[in-house]
């Protein structure tokens, strides 16, 4: 019988694999959208806008990703704290049964 850590690791591997598939699909969609938009945009009247620096956009995106990850981490930590009584209940029950 797998240990809780082994089970958790197996689940995490499946989630990670699923995330990679989703990320690839999103990247493919973004590329397709970008190519389509580029074709359409080339037929529109030109606007005089400064080109954004790719590095600045990348850094801004990474900063946002850090915020999202920190928020998700905090949420997950609070969720685990909230369900901790439920997850420790079987161990407490087994310990109480042994004491009898």
Image (cartoon, rainbow, N blue to C red):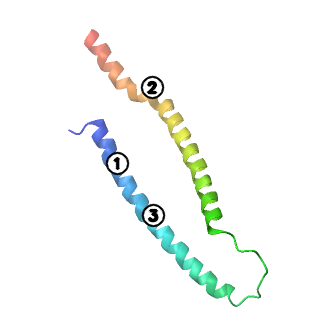
The residue located at (55%, 38%) in the rendering is 74
The residue sitting at the right extreme is: 48
Residue at image position (70%, 91%) is 43
Q: Quadrant of the C terminus?
A: top left
Q: Are marks 1 and 2 in contact (CB under 8 Å)?
A: no
Of badges 1 and 2, nearer the viewer stands 1
Position of 64 with respect to 94 (left or right) is right
Q: Dividing the picture into quarters, in which one does residue 91 lie?
A: top left
Q: Which residue is mark 2?
A: 85
Please report whichever mark, 1 or 2, sits nearer to the chain's N-terminal start.
1
Give residue 73's position: percent from left, percent from top. Answer: 52, 42
Badge 1: how crowded within 10 Å, few (<14), some, or many (20+)? few
Q: Do tag 3 and tag 2 residues touch (Cβ < 8 Å)?
A: no
Whole-angstrom CA distance, mark 3 to mark 2, is 34 Å
Foreground tag (3 vs 2): 3
Please state which of residues 62 and 97 is positioned toward the viewer in this rendering. Answer: 62
Identify the residue position indicated by label 3 in the image.
Answer: 22
Total of numbered circles in the picture? Answer: 3
Query: Where's residue 59, x and y in %?
Result: 61, 58
């Amino acid at each position: 019988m797998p240990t809780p850590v082994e089970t958790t690791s197996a689940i995490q591997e499946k989630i990670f694999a699923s995330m990679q598939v989703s990320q690839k699909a999103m990247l493919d969609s973004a590329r397709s959208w970008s190519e389509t938009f580029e074709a359409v945009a080339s037929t529109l009247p030109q606007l005089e806008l400064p080109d954004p620096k790719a590095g600045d956009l990348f850094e801004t995106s990474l900063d946002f990703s850090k915020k999202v990850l920190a928020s998700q981490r905090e949420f997950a930590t609070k969720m685990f704290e909230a369900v901790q009584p439920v997850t420790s209940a079987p161990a407490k029950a087994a310990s109480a049964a042994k004491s009898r």
